[in-house]
Image (cartoon, rainbow, N blue to C red):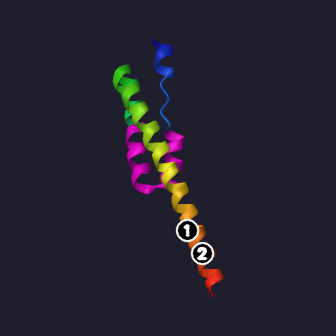
Amino acid sequence: METAQRNVPTYLGLSIFNLLCCCLPLGVAALIYSLRVENATGTGDMERASQASRTARMLNIVGIVIGIIFIIIGIVIVVLTRNAK
């Protein structure tokens, strides 16, 4: 049982990165689900931990993609406004 508890990733570090650097709303949600993984793992509820882990991973992926899209849009806007002058 001890090894099964260690195999469920929390994605806590990725959630914090997403929160600070990519997409704040999705980062907050991902952080909440990451903490749910830790809580469920601590109580031994591996099914709930596994589901929360999958949700945290998906929220992190979507948040990072949205963050990259916004960064690219921002760069394009800056380049276009500088070239228009």
Secondary structure type for disc 2:
helix
Q: Please give the residue where the numbered disc 1 appears in the rendered image.
A: 74
Where residue 75 appears, x then y in whole percent? 60, 68
Q: Is residue 59 above or below residue 41?
A: below
Of 43 and 68, which appears nearest the observer? 68
Q: Which mark is residue 25?
A: none
Q: Is residue 10 magenta?
A: no
Q: Is residue 32 magenta?
A: yes
Q: Is residue 59 left or right of residue 76?
A: left
Q: Quadrant of the N terminus?
A: top left
Residues in magenta, as a range: 12-34
Secondary structure type for disc 1:
helix
Which residue is found at the position 47% from the left and 49% from the top? Answer: 63
Crowd tier of the residue under label 1, counting other residues whose Cα lies within 10 Å: few below 14, some 14–19, many 20 or above: few
Of 84 and 37, which appears nearest the observer? 84
Crowd tier of the residue under label 2, counting other residues whose Cα lies within 10 Å: few below 14, some 14–19, many 20 or above: few
Which residue is found at the position 39% from the left and 54% from the top? Answer: 25
Q: Please give the residue where the numbered disc 2 appears in the rendered image.
A: 78
Magenta segment's dominant SS is helix
Separation of disc 1 and disc 2 at Cα? Answer: 6 Å
Q: Say if mark 1 contacts mark 2, CB within 8 Å.
A: yes
Which residue reaches farthest top?
1
Instruction: Identify residue type, mark 1.
Output: Gly
Q: Is residue 45 visible?
A: no
Q: Quadrant of the C terminus?
A: bottom right
Where residue 27 appears, x then y in whole percent? 44, 49
